[in-house]
Amino acid sequence: MAALIKKVLIVGFGSIGKRHTNIIRKYHSNIQITILTRSLLDKERFKDKNLYFTTSLQEAINLKPDAAIIANPSTKHLKISRSLCEKGIHLFIEKPIAAEIYGVQKLIDYCKLNKIILITGYNFRFLPSLLKFKQLIENQKIGNTLSIRAEVGQYLPTWRPNSDYRKNVSAQKKLGGGVILELSHEIDYLSWIFGPITWVKSHASKQSNLEIDVEDTVNIIFGCKKSDKYELTGSLCMDFIRHDTSRFCLAIGEKGSLLWDGISGEIKHFSQNINNWNVIFQDKPERDFTYLEEINHFFKAIENLEEPINPGSNGLDTLFIIDAIKRSSKIDTIVYI
């Protein structure tokens, strides 16, 4: 794996940039890593001959990386990604692909024209329990799905306990924060499993006294068009205010229900014939598992020059839904996508 990948650039050295760095150092120790960061304060913590820190984009480009992982704030994704793709550097852009739609399609088109691999970092697509949940839905374990109820909630100040939540990306509008962008995994996986979201009706607000300038809660009703005669509707609640961390998706079908618990890794089944919930699958891998799988998939796509399962176009599709959610809340009506 990654025989052709000799040098990787990691842009941004916050929590996700550090995670990607540590994973590559552990599982791909032959790869030379350059860290592009605003500050060199962390340099002394990493005594590694294959790790180089710089504050200069041009210096990072001059080192000729084969690939780059874009892990800086989403408001800065596009500008730096354009500079890198113009040099033929393959791109792994952490979610969301950008903070707004404008300019994303141009980046996608350029990458496609120049055979540059572009992946969007939605690592839940590599989570065993969610993959199994998707398979069960597609195999009609509960018949046709009739309704979806999804939720994700976590208290922002305890999300990253070793840092001041007020200074994190999640809390700042100028850095692409807010619950809609930061928790967009849900939007991505709902479209991936149940089909393209075609309309939304939402209400986003700041409900708490958290010291942030972004929304901390959003409630969304949405529709997925399955066929000309069949539209699947669902609801999604996302927040930064819940102390008891929660992440689940309930699919209600003709023959019963399926419940995916993203915290425990369990899938429960309620059959119309058995008046009880039964655990039918459980897999809770180590936290780095999905990130490693995602990085390996990225490297494999580069080596084989093949489209990844989470290309830039999927990231843009999710961004269109995000834009519709924000507009719907602002104008208080249904927005079609």
Image (cartoon, helix red, strand yellow):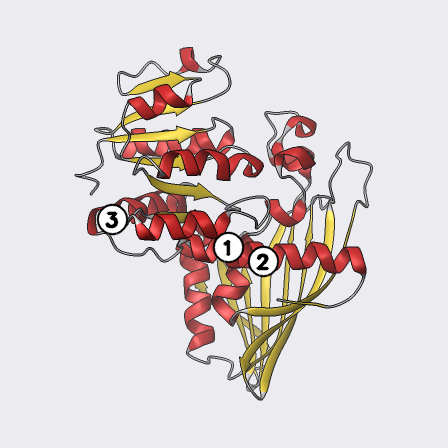
- Mark 1 near mark 2, Cβ–Cβ under 8 Å? yes
Name the residue tied to disc 1: 316
| Element at label 1 | helix
Residue 278: image tag: none
* Left or right placement of residue 28 versus residue 107 in this view: left
| Element at label 2 | helix
Whether residue 70 can be seen here: no
Residue 300: image tag: 3
Q: Give the label, 2 or 3, closer to the camera.
A: 2
For the residues marked 1 and 2, what is the alpha-carbon distance in whole angstroms? 6 Å
Q: Amino acid at mark 1?
A: Leu
Residue 323, x across and y down, in percent: 64, 55
Q: Say if 28 sits above or below 104 in the image.
A: above
Residue 263, x across and y down, in percent: 54, 51
Q: Quadrant of the C terminus?
A: bottom right
If you read the primary sequence from the N terminus, does the residue marked by circle 2 or circle 3 appear first?
Answer: 3
